[in-house]
Amino acid sequence: MNDYEAERIRSKCGKFRILIIGRANAGKTTILQRVCNTTENPVVYVKGEEVDPSILASSSDVCRPISMP
């Protein structure tokens, strides 16, 4: 998939959900950054409020939204 195709798909979808499971330091955030074409860290929301992403280190709550810039 080239950059044009990826951008076209992202503009069509707006928001989407991805579940990535893996060991610590396996590159999960890197995969999300590549998919979202960003080098910024994810933003985590709990009940609409932005929280520190380190809370994910010991959590497996798939209902907790994470947004990439």
Image (tube, helix red, strand yellow):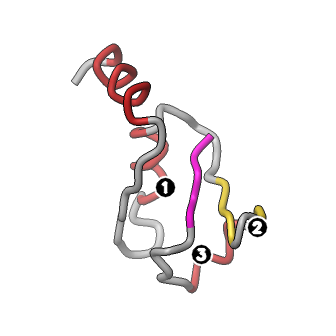
Q: Which mark is residue 40?
A: none
Q: Earlier in the sequence, mark 3 or mark 1?
A: 1
- Residue type of the residue flagged with mark 2: Val
Q: Which residues are magenta?
A: 65-69
Majority secondary structure of the magenta segment?
Answer: loop
In the rendered image, residue 52, in percent from the top left (x then y), is placed at: 75, 67
* Residue beneath disc 2: 51
Q: Is residue 22 above or below residue 36?
A: below
Corner quadrant of residue 17: bottom left
Question: In the rendered view, does 52 fall on the left or right side of 31?
Answer: right
In the rendered image, residue 49 lying in the magenta stretch gets the answer no
Mark 1 is on which residue type? Thr
Q: CA distance from mark 2 to mark 3?
A: 10 Å
Asked which secondary structure carries label 3, the reply is: helix
Most extreme residue toward the left is 1
Q: Which mark is residue 56?
A: 3
